[in-house]
Amino acid sequence: MNTTPRSRPRRARGPRARTGPASGTGPPAGPVPALYETEIAHTRTGPVRYGLRHRTYMWLVDLDRLPVLPRPLRPLARFDPADHFDGDAPTLRAALDARLAAHGVTGADGRVLMLAHARVLGHVFNPLTLYWCHARDGRPVCVVAEVHNTYGGRHAYVLFPDRRGRAETPKDFYVSPFLDVAGTYRMRLPLPGELLDLTVQLRLPDGTRPLTATVRGTRRPAGPGALLRAAVRHPWPTAAVSLGIRRHGIRLWLKGLRPRPRTAPTPQEGTP
């Protein structure tokens, strides 16, 4: 698998605006690209108790060194700028840089690692894509959490985690139809190493914690053999995620939950 870096023009250094502290978003990481065999779990504690677990695989890639697969395997993994942010940038790196600039973040001109599903057999759905952004000297600057909902909406949270990879941000994007756009996300997003261990928890103003999501996984080398084995174990994984969300939504509806009113998109949300 070819990971030869693409040349990228040097960015002019401007005044440093918002830059994050040294944090748990720094090393480890290890060689990339890499695959993570993952288990995603959601636990709801109210108004009804409900849990789900789903096994899949995800990619960790360098935005400036995206993997180039052998031609027969290319339908199993494609990274398309149209699948992220506003969908109109020429590259994923350009799309991310534009979003950081819109948030006043400078200094993230070094390595960026992205954890995401690739487009598989023409289909992609990424409920959560993470970007660990670094300065040229390797210092962590910020993490971008890009969230997609099943209505075609997209939203990016720009976070500045502490040394343990923890961050908080108000919830301001409609995701689950059974939850209002209210409360605060508490996230733990350490940069993956041999293990992947992420947590996102929603906390409401009354102190309740209706939803906790975890993503845990084990690193695998991203060679053709590993990709084929992952594809056999988890055929068409992105479609499985989309169908699973809808299946669990039906189960929650049967348990008595009803959709909350959908809010109008905020200006930074994209619906390509």
Image (cartoon, rainbow, N blue to C red):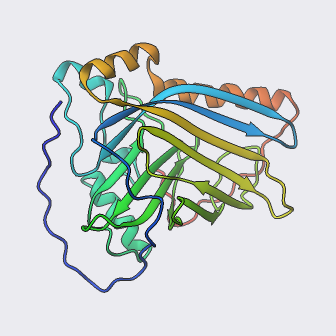
Decide: is 138 above or below 123: below
Residue at point 32% right, 68% down?
108
In x, y percent, where is residue 160?
50, 68
In x, y percent, where is residue 210?
79, 48
Residue in the foreground of this view, choosing between 192 and 2: 192
Residue 197 visible from this viewpoint: yes
Decide: is 67 above or below 75: below
Residue at point 17% right, 39% down?
3
In the displayed structure image, the side of residue 255 where residue 223 appears, left or right: left
In the displayed structure image, the side of residue 46 where residue 67 appears, left or right: left
In x, y percent, where is residue 69?
20, 29
Which residue is situated farthest in the bottom direction here? 15
Which residue is situated farthest in the top direction here? 232
In x, y percent, where is residue 19?
41, 75
Quadrant (top left/top right/bottom left/bottom right) for the N terminus: top left
In the displayed structure image, the side of residue 63 where residue 140 appears, left or right: right
Residue 85 visible from this viewpoint: no
Residue in the foreground of this view, choosing between 240 and 56: 56
Decide: is 175 above or below 55: below
